[in-house]
């Protein structure tokens, strides 16, 4: 199809299963695809919004959108005005370039969608709330979101959508790299999250796997790599959390007594806090993790501790024990006590002094004067003395 011809008429005239090739240039939207078709073209083929509503709406099953560009959409948040909105099963949205749209790619009430290899450029507005989501799933199942490149949008958000795959995406400069709400049995593998407020947040979900991801340089004020809230049976394995104010944040997780969260073989590097518990948590297991260059490996808000969390075989740079038999495991447990951390966790005003010589001196004094001795924060019964995981242990980094 040559640019300037009626795309809507071509779709209306095409038989089911037809393939439409878009020529370079501008093709005017909006467009509704209400029959099984393949529409493809190069990045120079552009479907452009007229400024109203969704630019390309898919209502039929087995529609494939491949390779072209989509520019713009309407600006109504309540209508989820998007570059592409998928409402039919078995859709493929692959290799598109999306610019200037409120929402990038949305999918609602569908099965077996594949959203892969797309480039989505958000508005980059300073106020995250005024941006739209790059990718938004609502009641989506058995689907895959893979190899997408997202920059300066708001969220990649997943609502009421169990049983999906999120693999090898790159998300930069947004609010939530991937945010799950009421969406269980999802897998998050091999993604890179850079300079977002939050890398991955799992809320009101269970049986979510977060494996082999890199989360780096979260927002320097309140950012975190991974957050759990009322989430259970979550597996967090083989990830790297680098230069984030908080590596992992755990809030009332798990909430069900039969659930356990497992954190295995993760690397925490140069985070202000490796793991932050909102209160005294339990039913969490930390095994084989490494804490390198963190101001504090573990903190607990309020007056709590992490003694009911299971710690085994983790590497802590500040472990002061010994290994007489040379097996690489400390002969005495790691039981960190820090009066400075205890004060900054319980009194907001003291957080301004984190990392200062004054609080460092306070820890020294607390070791000399038993009357000031703080309580044990947690116990690792078999701490490692050597780093077992290399800096490139996850995702080939």
Image (cartoon, rainbow, N blue to C red):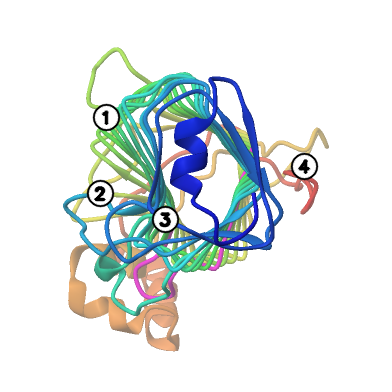
Give SS at disc 1.
loop
Number of other residues with Cα within 10 Å of mark 2, as a class: few under 14, some 14 to 19, many 20 or more: some
Q: For this view, does 210 lie left or right of residue 256? A: right
On the image, which quarter does residue 258 sit in? Answer: top left
Q: Residue at x 76, y 47 (%)?
A: 386
339 vs 133: above or below: below
Q: Which mark is residue 29?
A: 3
Number of other residues with Cα within 10 Å of mark 4, as a class: few under 14, some 14 to 19, many 20 or more: some
Give coordinates of residue 177: x percent, y percent. Answer: 46, 53
Front residue of this view, candidates 286 and 47:
47
Give coordinates of residue 27: x percent, y percent. Answer: 53, 58
User: Which residue is labeled 2 in the image?
Assistant: 278
Give coordinates of residue 321: x percent, y percent. Answer: 64, 49
| Magenta segment boundaries in residue numbering | 212-225
User: Which residue is labeled 4 in the image?
Assistant: 388
On the image, which quarter does residue 282 sit in? Answer: top left
Between circles 1 and 3, the one closer to the viewer is 3
Between circles 4 and 3, the one closer to the viewer is 3
Q: Residue at x 26, y 70 (%)?
A: 130
Is label 1 in contact with label 4 (beta carbons under 8 Å)? no
């Amino acid at each position: 199809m040559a640019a300037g011809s009626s795309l809507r008429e071509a779709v209306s005239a095409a038989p089911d299963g037809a393939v439409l090739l878009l020529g370079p240039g501008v093709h005017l939207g909006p467009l509704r695809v209400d029959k099984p078709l393949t529409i493809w073209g190069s990045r120079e083929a552009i479907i452009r919004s007229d400024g109203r509503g969704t630019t390309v709406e898919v209502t039929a099953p087995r529609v494939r959108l491949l390779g072209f560009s989509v520019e713009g959409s309407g600006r109504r948040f309540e209508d989820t005005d998007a570059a592409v909105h998928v409402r039919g099963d078995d859709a493929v949205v692959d290799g598109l370039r999306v610019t200037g749209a409120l929402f990038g790619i949305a999918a609602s009430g569908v099965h077996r969608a594949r959203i892969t290899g797309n480039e989505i450029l958000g508005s980059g507005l300073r106020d995250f709330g005024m941006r739209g989501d790059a990718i938004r799933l609502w009641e989506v199942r058995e689907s895959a979101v893979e190899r997408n490149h997202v920059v300066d949008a708001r969220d990649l958000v997943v609502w009421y959508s169990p049983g999906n795959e999120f693999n090898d995406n790159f998300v930069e400069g947004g609010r939530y790299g991937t945010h799950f709400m009421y969406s269980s049995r999802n897998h998050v593998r091999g993604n890179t999250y850079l300079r977002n407020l939050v890398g991955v947040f799992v809320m009101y979900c269970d049986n979510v796997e977060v494996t082999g991801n890199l989360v780096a340089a979260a927002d320097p004020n309140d950012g975190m790599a991974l957050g759990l809230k009322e989430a259970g049976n979550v597996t967090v394995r083989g990830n790297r959390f680098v230069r984030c104010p908080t590596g992992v944040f755990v809030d009332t997780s798990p909430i069900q007594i039969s659930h356990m969260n497992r954190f295995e073989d993760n690397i925490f590097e140069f985070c202000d806090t490796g793991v932050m518990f909102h209160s005294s948590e339990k039913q969490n297991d930390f095994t084989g993790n490494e804490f390198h260059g963190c101001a504090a490996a573990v903190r607990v808000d309020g007056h709590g501790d992490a003694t009911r969390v299971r710690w085994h075989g983790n590497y802590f740079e500040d472990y002061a024990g010994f290994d007489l038999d040379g097996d690489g495991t400390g002969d005495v447990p790691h039981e960190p006590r820090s009066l400075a951390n205890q004060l900054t966790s319980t009194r907001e005003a003291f957080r301004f002094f984190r990392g200062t010589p004054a609080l460092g001196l306070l820890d020294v004094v607390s070791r000399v004067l038993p009357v000031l001795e703080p309580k044990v924060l947690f116990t690792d019964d078999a701490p490692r003395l050597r780093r077992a995981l290399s800096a490139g242990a996850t995702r080939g980094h």
